[in-house]
Amino acid sequence: MEYLLSNLGINQDKNELPKIREGEASRLLEQFPDRVPVLISHVGKDITIDKRKYLVPKNLELGQFLHILRRRSTLRPTDAIFLFISSKNLLVPMNKEMGSLHAQLSEEGFLNISLQKENTFG
């Protein structure tokens, strides 16, 4: 992360990072008012995913987003993924829409989601 920030010419002060994220999120929300910025903040060591930032429709359900994440990861069909929302590590129902989750639980303008894997069949 520090390497990316230094390439952008941004001071690496950790106090400025929330301001940068808020600015990026507000710019995205202004440009795409019908979308939600999602940040995959923590992924378990045994999960490989190719993207960490997503811009998803507000009416997309969490279960549909889980399907997108599953397709973009290297998980086996026998592995289960648990999605924890925000720094509070909340498990929410899969039928919740991303727009309502963003309105309730966004931090720094992004909906932060942590992924954890659980082996379900052995």
Image (cartoon, rainbow, N blue to C red):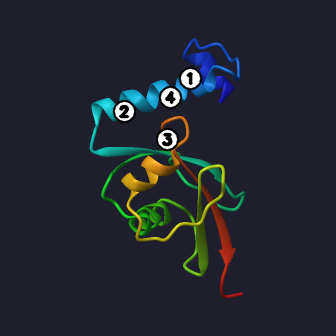
Q: Secondary structure at mark 2?
A: helix
Disc 3 target residue: 110
Disc assigned to residue 22: 4
**Residue 38 coordinates in the image, percent (x, y):** 47, 46
x then y, percent, for residue 114: 62, 55
Which quadrant of the view contains residue 91? Answer: bottom right
Q: Please give the residue where the numbered disc 2 appears in the rendered image.
A: 28
Residues at discs 4 and 1 in contact (Cβ within 8 Å): yes
Badge 3 vs badge 1, beta-carbon distance below 8 Å: no
Query: Which amino acid type is shown beneath numbered disc 3?
Result: Phe
Tag 3, which secondary structure?
A: loop
Contact (CB < 8 A) between labels 4 and 3?
Answer: no
Instruction: Give whichever of discs 2 and 1 has the lower sequence position.
Output: 1
The Cα atoms of the two marked residues, 2 and 1, are separated by: 14 Å
Q: Amino acid at mark 1?
A: Lys
Determine whether the residue tagged by mark 4 lies in a helix, strand or loop: helix
Give the quadrant of the N terminus: top right
| Secondary structure of the residue carrying numbered label 1 | helix
Of pointers 3 and 1, the one earlier in the residue sequence: 1
Name the amino acid, label 4. Glu
Amino acid bearing label 2: Leu
Q: Residue at 56% x, 64% y: name it.
A: 74
Dot 3 or dot 2, earlier in sequence = 2
Outermost residue, front side: 104
Disc 4/disc 1 C-alpha distance (Å): 5 Å
Closer to us: 75 or 21: 21
Which residue position is annotated with label 1?
19
Pick the front one: 88 or 60:
88
